[in-house]
């Protein structure tokens, strides 16, 4: 029985460390700390900034997106948008051309054949003139002071990359938007604390971050999580990655579990791609970079296996004592929560805590499927826009 007890407790303790202990340690260690202070710049000394964006069939959000860029508080003569259309078939190209005709500083390229975000960014960044790049997604709306916040934070010589704070909008109780928002905001806090303690923020939100031009690297073909790849490349070169919670951008979060499940599969496959490339950064695990990478990311990526090992071990320990019997049935209930929540949803019954547990188990299932996809080989990084609340309002599901 000793072997099964070990197989039970090691996964439990690892999951406890990643989801509970590590965030608590960050909270404790970050007391009294803040982002490194860079040199305060006068407006006339602000650097030239290039916003990089890949777009595919984003006609519903594109006009608002471009307006949020050029109506920001950052000087227009120090700002450009470099945008590539990944073989869009809707009005994306004509919307961009309309802004060009109005005199906005936009470098626009139309690409035939789907290459995915990574492929588009690889072709865009050599065209950019700025000393600071801000890669972003079409559905992310900039707050007026966001660009200036990111630029100010990058004035510290050790900072190579700064992630924005993505705030979700369009919350709806009948789906997973509140659970997704809770997850993202918790991630924002964890990343912020990693940044202010060690400068080891584990991965920028690819929807919006700033990076020094000289640190932006070509992304490998068919790479799905280019933001994490670029973040770890910056850390590997000895620069800090941080998150500025004051640099706010807004996103219309998806409310549909099926849509988020597909997105998480894609993210998961990209996570394992990155682990294959950057596994050497895990050593030594007692240094800040290895400790952050292991605690925040790698243990979570192993989550499906840890959950399965724990469940199997508990099954063999059922007769040992009441604790293991209770643990076994609690795990059974946990695995069943996605089905229970789906049934209650059909009855128009919504419980936040139950759906949050269902979200946890669903996302671990997505991790497992993503791993299988990675093992089979990823042949393209092309994507389709996630169905958002704006699409649901127009009857698109």
Image (cartoon, rainbow, N blue to C red):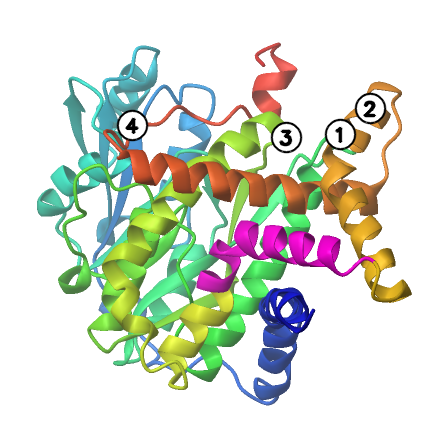
User: Which residue lies under the disc numbered 3?
Assistant: 257
Give the CA distance from mark 4 to mark 2: 33 Å
Circle 4 SS class: loop
Q: Earlier in the sequence, mark 4 or mark 1?
A: 1
Per the rendered image, the range of residues in magenta is 297-318
- Name the side, left or right, on which 38 lies relative to 143: left
Quarter of the rendering occupied by the N terminus? bottom right
User: Which residue is disc 2 drawn over?
Assistant: 343
Task: Compare marks 4 and 2 and give the one earlier in the sequence.
Answer: 2
Left-right relation of 256 to 314: left
Q: Which mark is residue 339?
A: 1
Name the residue beneath numbered marker 4: 382
Q: Secondary structure at mark 1?
A: helix
Q: Neighbour class for label 2 at 10 Å: few (<14), some, many (≥20)? A: few
For the point 38% across and 56% down, the residue is 147
Q: Residue 44: percent from the left, percent from the top? A: 25, 67
* Residue 26 position (above or below residue 68): below
């Amino acid at each position: 029985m000793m072997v099964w007890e070990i197989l039970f407790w090691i996964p439990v303790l690892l999951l406890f460390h990643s989801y509970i202990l590590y965030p608590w340690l960050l909270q404790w260690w970050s007391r009294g700390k803040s982002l490194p202070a860079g040199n305060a710049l006068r407006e006339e000394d602000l650097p030239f900034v290039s916003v990089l964006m890949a777009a595919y069939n984003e006609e519903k959000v594109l006009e608002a997106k471009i307006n949020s860029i050029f109506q920001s508080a950052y000087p227009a003569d120090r700002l450009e948008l470099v945008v590539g259309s990944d073989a869009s078939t809707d009005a994306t190209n004509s919307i961009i051309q309309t802004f060009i005709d109005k005199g906005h500083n936009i470098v626009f390229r139309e690409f035939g054949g789907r290459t995915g975000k990574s492929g588009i960014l690889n072709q865009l960044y050599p065209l950019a003139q700025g000393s600071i790049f801000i890669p972003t997604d079409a559905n992310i709306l900039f707050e007026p002071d966001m660009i200036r916040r990111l630029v100010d934070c990058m004035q510290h010589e050790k900072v190579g990359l700064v992630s924005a704070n993505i705030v979700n909008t369009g919350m709806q109780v009948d789906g997973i938007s509140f659970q997704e928002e809770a997850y993202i905001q918790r991630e924002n806090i964890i990343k912020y604390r990693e940044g202010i303690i060690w400068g080891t923020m584990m991965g920028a939100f690819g929807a919006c971050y700033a990076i020094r031009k000289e640190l932006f690297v070509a992304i490998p073909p068919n790479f799905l999580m280019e933001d994490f790849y670029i973040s770890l490349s910056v850390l590997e070169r000895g620069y800090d990655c941080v998150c500025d919670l004051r640099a706010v951008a807004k996103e219309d979060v998806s409310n549909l579990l099926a849509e988020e499940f597909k997105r998480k599969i894609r993210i998961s496959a990209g996570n394992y791609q990155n682990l294959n490339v950057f596994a050497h950064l895990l050593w030594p695990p007692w240094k800040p970079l290895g400790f952050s990478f292991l605690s925040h990311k790698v243990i979570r990526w192993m989550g499906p296996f840890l959950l399965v090992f724990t469940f199997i071990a508990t099954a063999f320990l059922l007769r040992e004592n009441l604790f293991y019997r209770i643990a076994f049935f609690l795990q059974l209930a946990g695995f069943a929560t996605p089905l229970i929540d789906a049934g209650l949803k059909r009855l128009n019954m919504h419980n936040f805590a139950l759906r949050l547990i269902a979200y946890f188990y669903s996302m671990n299932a997505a991790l497992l499927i993503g791993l299988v996809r990675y093992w089979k080989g990823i042949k393209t990084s092309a994507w389709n826009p996630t169905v958002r609340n704006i699409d649901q309002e127009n009857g698109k599901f």
